[in-house]
Amino acid sequence: MLRFNMRAWILLLLFAGTFYSEDISGCEQQPCQNGGVCESHSGGFQCLCSQQSRNGRLYGGANCTVPLSGCDENQCENGGICSPLLVNDQQTYTCICPPGYTGPKCQISTTFSFESQGYMYMDTKQLDPETPLNVTFSFRTENPTGTLFQRRVDDLLLTIELIDGHLCLLNLRDQGTSTLVQELPQYLSNNKWHTVEASLGGVVSLIRLLCSERSCTRDYSVEIQLMDQAAHLPEPGALRQSLFVGAIGGKWVSGRAQDGADHPPAFLGCFRDVFVDSHLVLPAEVPKDSNIQVNIIAGCSDKDKCEDNPCQNRGRCVSQGWRRYVCKCHRPYEGHNCTEEYITARFGNKDLESYAMFSIDNDPGDSVVITMFIRTRQSSGLLLILANTTSQYLRLWLVEGRVKVQVNNYENLVGRNTVSNGHFQLLTVKLEGTAATLFQSAQIQNSIAIRRVQIHPGDLVYVGGLPDLRASASFGGYFKGCIQDLRINSKRLQFYPVSTPVESYNLEKLEAVAQGCSSDNTCAANPCLNGGECYSMWDDFICSCPSNTAGKRCEEVKWCELSPCPATAICQPLSQGFECKYPFLKDLLLQHYCLKIHVPLQARISIP
Ligand SMILES: *[C@@H]1O[C@H](CO)[C@@H](O)[C@H](O)[C@H]1NC(C)=O
Ligand SMILES: *[C@@H]1O[C@H](CO)[C@@H](O)[C@H](O)[C@H]1NC(C)=O
Ligand SMILES: *[C@@H]1O[C@H](CO)[C@@H](O)[C@H](O)[C@H]1NC(C)=O
Ligand SMILES: *[C@@H]1O[C@H](CO)[C@@H](O)[C@H](O)[C@H]1NC(C)=O
């Protein structure tokens, strides 16, 4: 009996098992329409509606029969994906935002960038120093170095830094010790977005690469709360609890040497989707002089800065990674954008005896290139001398309008083209081991073999002349003209320094040299004769001569044009006068009847 009963119970339980779902769930009636999947629940069923649209529609409601229209006018901005919903029988939607955007309609950009040293500061005083700070962020840069985050907890500075393109976590102590805690193996300075999670503080700090570029997804439907920003940044000494985001230079870092050399370099690049303990961090509207947010730019521009043609004066722009460039300037231009020009020095202004002297403070090595722009109309004069205490081992001067180079008092090199034409031209003297070469405006002039010369610290460079008048005279006297952008190798010899910092030799003396390249007032001495009109040019003049005079100073009078001879005679010009010739007389008679008139050169006559 007992045995039978047990069997009956088992059967009953089995029957109960089979009938349970039929009786209580409604899934047998296949209530879920439009591809919905039915799930039984205690006391009923639930439809999981298909996420695949049918005839361009998604369906919702208890039985997936209600067409969803919440996204009929796509509500999401910035490429967000709209997902229609039925909430309490109301049509609505939610947006799935692409990286870099947030908000109910993805209308808020979370991207910001640093194009120069800057940061965003957050006060973390209210946080327990023992609790780790959860940080997730995406970044993008081409620069292999830069500091992205710093959290200070008392005398410990936790730093997330790019070192050689690898993201590193470092512990810096105020005493100056620095410990590398972790280094990610991937190279991340490749101008792609990378998403990183970090835990800063607490027992263990660590960083983890979540994803790179497009493989990053994030649930943006969660309610976003903004991180409260600090009102102002306290003095560095009072910074016991803080968090910095961005291109943090050495300024707020007290854990490292303050000499500037060891400071972490600034991070230049972009951030997006920065979350600190699930709070979104965004640049805020702050007053211009605010120190909690410095040099932050909204968005992340990919543009090559060279497209703006920042280099002036035909300088060549070279892109230098993320939003940076350098200008390769043409001489004599200098500066970040090639806007500054080396200041020209005028020698021999009003025929003054002028010169400049520089001292050598380095060893330029075995290969020496001396270059300068010169402008002159004089065919002689001293350009440059390099001398040590015993010898003037390099001399440059003008002879008959040509450049002459003399090495070691002995080897001579003369240019083929004249330079004294009143135009600027680049002179280059190359001393390479045992060869000396002269170039004028990049054209090779001549080359000779020389005995090696060696420039030593303490040697002197004289430009335009020597202190001694007679010594200068043996090189055709003092130089008259202009010199600009003089260099020995890459080091400048500046008569008047430009504001761009450049490596320069020391100017020891500047005697009667003037700034600029002004001309002498060449018309002041009335050089034009016979009523000619004087026009001044740079260190020269032009005479506009009356019709019957000629020559540079109108000194040649065309006497015959004044018809001075009798009608039967022919007027013939002489070098300083004229003669009347009678062609029909015999040679013998000619002597007697010929009238010769010589006019002194300086005589001025008025010409009708
Ligand atoms: C869903 O289907 C069930 C069973 O087929 C039915 O009883 C119920 O009324 C339907 N609900 C709606 C809202 O259509
Ligand atoms: C930080 O993240 C870890 C792991 O994701 C979590 O366990 C912890 O609660 C988070 N801490 C805070 C303060 O959000
Ligand atoms: C160089 O040019 C850029 C754009 O043309 C400008 O923004 C920048 O201030 C300039 N820099 C200097 C040092 O003049
Ligand atoms: C001066 O230069 C010449 C030529 O290079 C060299 O022979 C001589 O030793 C140098 N004198 C001194 C004192 O350096």
Image (cartoon, rainbow, N blue to C red):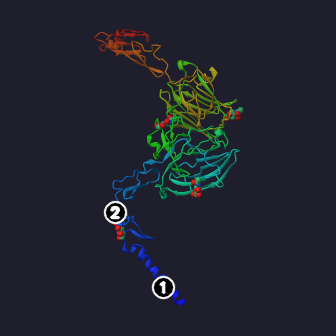
Single out the mark in the foreground, 2 or 1: 1
User: Which image quadrant shows ligand 2?
Assistant: bottom right
| Label 2 environment density (alpha carbons within 10 Å; few <14, some 14–19, many ≥20) | some
The residue drawn where x is 39% and y is 12% is: 531
Residue identified by numbered label 2: 66
Residue identified by numbered label 1: 11
Residue 230 — which label? none
Q: Secondary structure at mark 1?
A: helix
Q: Secondary structure at mark 2?
A: strand
Taking depth in this image into account, of 450 and 283 the one nearest to the observer is 283
Q: Which tag, 2 or 1, sits closer to the chain's start?
A: 1
Find out if the beta carbon at label 2 lies less than 8 Å from the nearest ligand 1 atom. Answer: no
Taking depth in this image into account, of 8 and 468 the one nearest to the observer is 8
The residue drawn where x is 47% and y is 28% is: 423
Q: Amino acid at mark 2?
A: Val
Marks 2 & 1, CB-CB < 8 Å contact: no
